[in-house]
Image (spheres, grey):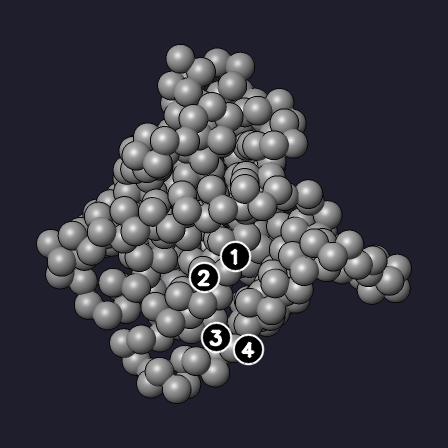
Amino acid sequence: MNILLHILMNNVLPLTVMIAVGMAMEKAFKMDIKTLSKLNFYVFSPAIMFNLLYRTDIPLKLFGQVMLFVLCFLAAQYAVLEAVVRIRQYDGGMRSAMRNSVLFYNSANYGIPLNQLAFAGNPYTLSVQILVMMTQSLIPNTYGVYNVNAHKAKWKDIRKVILSMPVIYVIPVALALRYFEVSVPGPIETPIGYLADAFIGTALLTLGVQLGGMKWRVSRSMAADVGISVFLRLVIGPALAALVVWALGIHGMMAAALIVSSAVPTSLSSVLLAVEFDNESEFASQTVFVSTVVSIVSVTTVIYLLHL
């Protein structure tokens, strides 16, 4: 009960309050969601990624193990997703939206606080979570962009969009500066810190604005699709993660941290991609919202099972 209450009060409730503020702003002022989306993609998201990677000491062995897990885990998730996509016979836009809703999960503003809670602020497990967050920032800005555009645009045009995403350059620069112990000048480091601090609030407000602009008339077919997405993300996700860590022979704190990292709800990135590229934004918003609410129970269950 203590874990459930803690997750509710310190993770889910604050997120819900911020989303509610965004919904209220949309109802009152009819916000420009495209501008909010661009701020997230091109300013705040790269800033928080640079800040975390530059400030965190990550051993090379840990880096390799986490990257191997991520590759295997994503491959397993993708295999399950493809089976579902084929059975449900989704069209191009819905197919990409379903993939994004399951493959991209909230490893930053939900995953990091959850990691700190579940492992009592352990710096080792925090490093694991930051690496997972790095991949969950890079993949939506590369594969995610391709995925939502592949059915309606040429590869040449998609490639230009991907190459315009700052995150794909920020990650190697931050890692290189950290590895070679290069100091970032104060006049640059301070603004990066300000922008990084703005990421979570702006992303949640963007989700709220999107939800506030929806009519909320969910057809039976969409309700079923949202349910499938949430089940794949919150139940099948950690189950596959447990299978992967067992297959790779990963044990102890790293195994637990990787399983917990996989149990979080759908990422805000799926909404930002859907809004930015006009691809099933209503479905994307609902999967984020519903998975976040349902995660109160599912995440608590995962942590409880790990404690056993």
Which element is circle 2 on?
helix
Mark 3 to mark 2: distance in Å?
10 Å
Residue located beneath label 4 in the image = 164
Q: Are marks 4 and 3 in contact (CB under 8 Å)?
A: yes
| Amino acid at dot 1 | Ser
Inspect this view and state whether residue 297 appears. no
Which numbered circle lies on residue 102? none
Q: Position of residue 202 (x, y in %)?
A: 63, 56
Q: Position of residue 281 (x, y in %)?
A: 39, 63
Residue located beneath label 2 in the image = 140
| Amino acid at dot 3 | Ile
Labels 1 and 4: the sequence-earlier one: 1
Crowding at mark 3 (Cα within 10 Å: few <14, some 14-19, many 20+): some
Mark 4 to mark 3: distance in Å?
5 Å
Which element is circle 3 on?
helix
Taking depth in this image into account, of 45 and 12 the one nearest to the observer is 45
Q: Are marks 2 and 1 in contact (CB under 8 Å)?
A: yes
| Amino acid at dot 4 | Ser
Residue at 43%, 26% (x, y): give it.
251
Q: Is residue 267 left or right of residue 76?
A: right
Residue located beneath label 1 in the image = 137
Mark 4 to mark 2: distance in Å?
13 Å
Q: Residue furthest right?
A: 186
Q: Is residue 219 left or right of residue 128?
A: left
Q: Position of residue 191 (x, y in %)?
A: 80, 61
Mark 1 to mark 4: distance in Å?
15 Å
In the rendered view, tell whether residue 300 sits above or below residue 222.
Answer: above
